[in-house]
Amino acid sequence: MPQKNYSLWSLLKQGFQRQEGWDQAWRSPEPKASYDVIIVGAGGHGLATAYYLAKEHGIKNIAVIEKGYLGGGNTARNTTIVRSNYLWDEAAMLYEHSLKLWEGLSQEINFNVMFSQRGVFNLGHTLQDMRDIERRVNANLMNDIDAQVLTAAEVKEHIPMIDASPNARYPIMGASYQPRAGVARHDAVAWGFARAASNLGVDIIEQCEVTGMLIEGGRIRGVETSRGTIRADRVGCVASGHSSTLAKMAGIRLPLESHPLQAFVSESLKPVLHTVVMSNAVHGYVSQSDKGELVIGAGIDSYLSYAQRGSPHIIEHTAAAIIELFPMFSRVRMNRQWGGIVDVSPDACPIISKTKIKGLYFNCGWGTGGFKATPGSGNVFAHTIANDHAHPLNEAFALDRFHSGHLIDEHGAAGVAH
Amino acid sequence: MLKFHCPHCNEVREEEEFSYAGEAYIARPAAPDGVSDEEWGDYLFMRKNSKGWHWEQWLHSASCRKVVAVKRHTYTHEIAGCWTLAEGKRIYLEEQA
């Protein structure tokens, strides 16, 4: 019988067997002719959706199809930060739902996603920043989300390496602090959800690109793929940067623009930064991974692009922001840089919604901040697909808000400018 | 790094001098009072977001501050041409026809 659980005992046993007895983490079956539900996109959100569909809604005949390899898109191209300190109730409740799932995730899926609640600081550099921070912290507290306003001296006490001197170009005046926020290992999240979903019978089919949608009489009947036609009466699309191209196949327009978002990591250092630091004004964010690398990110490139790279001057801008905060990082060498394609919506909030095609659902528009939402997004999207109506937490995130005008404008409140 | 030829300055300049100003030639409904919420929302928010050739606007913000129409491939970043808005619109409409 292959190893089904990662436990202290199985780790010990494998230690004596040269680690050669481990089972494949997830199955790689051939696609069947039809499924109850097809999820397009095997990133974190897609795999989480399949997992919760199988676990909470009793749907067993599910396929997740992926044009590349599992977790090779934005899941592999982010800065791993998890937090829920959003301003508007709708967004705060959705991300907090996700944060609560993160807190039990490693246990639940029996896979160490290395979730580390090391806290997140959002720095304020102007009086207006501080007023926004106070407003957001108060809003968080009213939603039962942990948050504190810290002074510059308190920030310096927590993060000794930071330049908190009043002579800095953009002096730090204070910060908001969410202690329960933190980071998680992005690859492990995809692998863990894949393994857990596969164990519940979900077929994960890689190297299978969707080339068309089968629509009959206004409802979805399946998808055409590079590996043949696969039929299903319910299809959930979770394809981040490529959501618009999928929507086009179904004759739907989405309010999205796809932009490159770059990030980079340094060589490994001894521990210097035990938390996550974000700054809206100088516009950068940094944390240190468990391997010791500095993980650094900033904003999107301004223009529409599907090439997974960005412009060099954005890297310069990001590095300048980080060195403004941590002058000591100026001599750290960078190991690698990457660009992912993020689908930005006009109100900087996701779209988790039914569409005018019956049985076709979209989960997209996460912009620059989708990683933190992985379990919560999958959880409410699974509910939406299983019941053909929104979970209370994603009702406000429907497509019709762009016609009704009920936008959830998180641009300023997201903690980082988009 | 993208490089654009500004038809107003008649110079090839780097992307940093320009600001991206979104999809070009989105037609505003001729009679705004007569359109449904759906049509108005579509005009305001829905975008082609093409993977491939894309008509877009760039503002030459650090120089002449005029708007340039650009036809650019969003996957290869190849630039087919840069025009004034009026010249570009003529080519755009010919392509659409």
Image: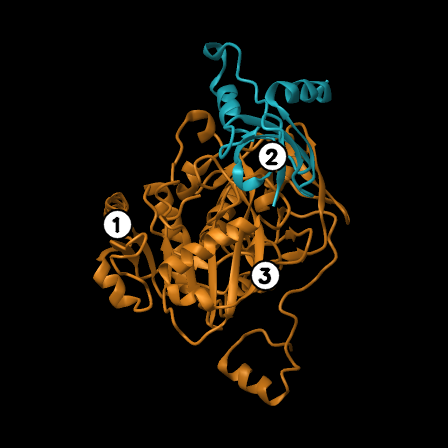
Chain colours: A orange, B cyan
Residue A306 is situated, as x and y percent measured from the top left of the image, at 63, 44
Chain letter for the residue marked with disc 3 in the picture:
A
At 49% from the left and 41% from the top, the residue drawn is A352
Rendered position, B43 above or below A36: above
Residue B68 is situated, as x and y percent measured from the top left of the image, at 58, 27
| Residue at disc 2, secondary structure | loop
From the image, which quarter does the N terminus of chain A lie in? bottom right
Q: Is residue A71 left or right of residue A133?
A: right
| Residue at disc 3, secondary structure | helix
Rendered position, A254 above or below A123: above
How far apart are labels 3 and 1 at the CA level? Answer: 35 Å
| Residue at disc 1, secondary structure | helix
Rendered position, A324 above or below A233: below
- Residue closest to the eye, B20 or A97: B20
Chain letter for the residue marked with disc 2 in the picture:
B
Kind of residue at badge 1: Val
Which label number is shown at residue A194?
3
Q: Would residue A178 be visible to someone looking at this image?
A: yes
From the image, which quarter does the C terminus of chain A lie in? top left
Chain letter for the residue marked with disc 1 in the picture:
A
Q: Is residue A166 left or right of residue A337?
A: left
Q: Which residue is mark 2?
A: B49
Q: Earlier in the sequence, mark 3 or mark 1?
A: 1
Depth check, mark 2 against mark 3: the one in front is 2
- Residue closest to the eye, B30 or A96: B30
Kind of residue at badge 2: Asn
Q: Which residue is mark 1?
A: A137
Q: Would residue A47 be visible to someone looking at this image?
A: no
> Does mark 1 fall on the same chain as mark 3?
yes
